[in-house]
Image (cartoon, rainbow, N blue to C red):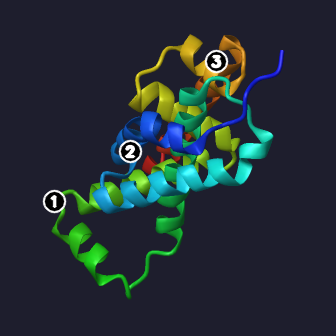
Amino acid sequence: MTESKIDITTYYTKYGPMVLRRCRQLLVDEQKALDAMQDVFLILLEKQDRLTNSHPSSLLYRIATNVCLNLIQKNRKFMNVENMEELQQIAKHENYNENIFVRDFLNRIFHNEYPSTREIAVMRFIDKMTYEQISTEVKLSVSGVRKRLRKLQENAQFTRGEHYGE
């Protein structure tokens, strides 16, 4: 049985709102979310010859998650003094020091992890997905998903103890 190829226009019309919601959820910034949504469909357009028309919502959800996580990571790496508007927003935030601690903590936790582990963590702790749902999305067994999260939790406890000098 041959599966049909992807129709970008139909996908954009049907799944665009879902992709935009996902991007808004992860990026919080409307313009960045709109740009990320466009990036998702550009990736789909570039790779449409290698993709089939099966499970489109899952595919787009994963692409959107990866695009947003990559943007978040990129923004952290290239944040500099020239970007005054973003710095002013952070400076106005009441919990600035806490945010720095959280970012540093998360970077240490995920430093030696597979890229998909960050995605698994987002699905579990932000999206509140079940182990079974995550397993289907990332093509790992349920026990594999649990193992990744358990290792991540152990790493977090070690990192937290290291930070507090325990």
Q: Earlier in the sequence, mark 3 or mark 2?
A: 2
Please name the residue shown 48% across and 35% down the image: 122
Tell me the crowding category of disc 2: few under 14, some 14 to 19, or many 20 or more residues within 10 angstroms, Cα based.
many
Which quarter of the rendering shows the N terminus? top right
Q: Percent x, y for residue 96? A: 25, 62
User: CA–CA distance between discs 1 and 2?
Assistant: 28 Å
Identify the residue at horizontal 50%, vertical 59% (top origin): 71
Specify the amino acid type for callout 3.
Thr
What separation in Å lies between label 3 and label 2 (alpha carbons)? 22 Å
Residue wearing tag 3: 136
Q: Position of residue 127 (x, y in %)?
A: 41, 28
Looking at the picture, which amino acid does disc 2 mark? Leu
Q: Is residue 124 above or below residue 9?
A: above
Mark 3 vs mark 2, foreground winner is: 2
Along the viewing direction, whichever of 73 and 146 lies nearer the viewer: 73
Judging by the rendered image, the residue that carries numbered circle 1 is 94
Residue drawn at the location 41% of the way across and 46% of the way down: 23
- Judged left or right of residue 62, residue 96 is left
- The amino acid at mark 1 is Glu
| Above or below, 153 relative to 27 | above
The tag on residue 20 is: 2
Tell me if I can see residue 153 in this picture: no
Element assignment for label 1: loop
User: What is the secondary structure assignment of the residue under circle 2?
Assistant: helix
